[in-house]
Image (cartoon, helix red, strand yellow):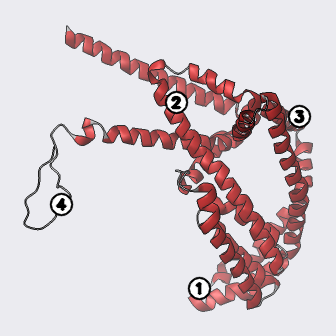
Amino acid sequence: MSERQDDLATIAAFYRRVQWTAVALGVLWLLWLLAPVLSPFALAALLGWLGDPLVDRLERARFKRNTAVILVFSAMSLLLLVAAVLLVPMLEQQIVTLVHSLPGYRDWFVGTALPWVERRTGLEILSWLDPERLFTLIREHWERAGGIAATVLGYVSRSGFALLGLLANIVLLPVLTFFFLRDWDLLVARVGLLVPRDHADTVRTLARESDAVLGGFLRGQFLVMLILGVLYAIGLWGVGLDLGILIGILAGLLTFVPYLGPASIVVFGGIAAMVQFGDWQHLAGVAVVFTVGQIIESYWLTPKLVGDRIGLHPMAVIFAVTAGGTLFGFLGMLLALPVAAVANVLLRYAHERYTASSLYAGEQPRIVLAPDAAAPGDGPSPQA
């Protein structure tokens, strides 16, 4: 009779797993269908999560919740507005400069760089690669785009429904962000009430650890990217590079991947210096900018702002963002890092449970050497 009851319990547990798997697949399918609609909600939730600690800090300073939300929301809106006013015209001008500079880069690659590589390696690159056609395609692409405004206008003209959706998202984003900021603690509390009481403490601990991992990565790394982007842009502009601001901002954005951000400064900055000036003095200036940026990042920015709070390997970040964008588009890219942070915490928790289980340790007592029993000739000291 007991064996029959055990079999029934096993079957019931299997069916519960099947049901939860079906629910998870259904949720993923629904997310895939509603990805365009959910994108502004996900972005607003992310902004609300980033701003909630500031709101809580103002509340502890005896501000009312609504007043604290208004102050934080106004500060975030002002920062975004200033960034848009300063960066958009600057980047548009840099792109125009890049388009006009493409013939010079083409001539340098065809007349200087590729022949130098051929002489050093013995490869006949020019015979199977047509740099002229490549640069022509790049130039035509940028000229057809005509800058950010022309790209947006072309997208709008192709689809009136897309225009309405874009305008709706732009209008919804600040409204949703404000409500997420105001009600974030209430939403978290309501979600917490849905967790089974037997697992509430475990889920609460894992949620706090996930929040710390994701917060450490986003807040710290975002500040590192911002500061380094500004430093690189100012430094390369000071060296005299026409594309210094564009290269500096690009290097700052790529800083979250080790070696990729600094490598972009060396490669793109070095090429720009050689094409524009063709002397070692400006190439040395790029090297100085690179060295100063690396010293500031390694000895001050990363230890102070990021430290060891990330817990996410750069390859995991790249894979998560790429996979999320492939599966769910822009919504997937927004949710990629939160999902990766939670998955990282859950994997660590599963590893701790596994190493503490009898499956890993076994049923028999282990015999280990005592710390003072390392001398040759001494017998091992058994310990349970």
- Cα separation, mark 3 vs mark 1, equals 54 Å
Disc 4 on helix, strand or loop? loop
Badges 2 and 1: C-beta atoms under 8 Å apart? no
Tell me: 300 left or right of 276.
left
Q: Amino acid at mark 4?
A: Asp
- How much space separates mark 3 and mark 4, taking CA atoms? 75 Å
Which residue is label 1 attached to? Answer: 123
- Of the residues under marks 2 and 1, which one precedes in the sequence? 1
Given contact means CB atoms under 8 Å apart, are the residues at marks 1 and 4 in contact? no
Distance (Cα) linking label 4 and label 2: 42 Å
Where residue 236 sits: x, y (%)? 78, 75
Residue visible at 65% across and 53% down? 220
Which is more foreground, mark 3 or mark 1?
Answer: 3
Q: Nearer the viewer, mark 4 or mark 2?
A: 4
Which label belongs to residue 204?
2
Between marks 2 and 3 in the image, the one whose residue lies nearer the viewer: 2
Q: Tags 3 and 1 in contact by the CB under 8 Å rule?
A: no
Instruction: State yes or no: discs 2 and 3 in contact (Cβ < 8 Å).
Output: no
Q: Which mark is residue 164?
A: 3
Q: Earlier in the sequence, mark 1 or mark 4?
A: 1
Q: Classify 209 as above or below 219.
A: above
Question: Relative to the observer, which residue lies in front, 377 or 341?
Answer: 377
Left or right of 382: which side holds 346? right
Q: Residue furthest top?
A: 1
Residue 179 x %, y %:
78, 29
Q: Which mark is residue 372?
A: 4
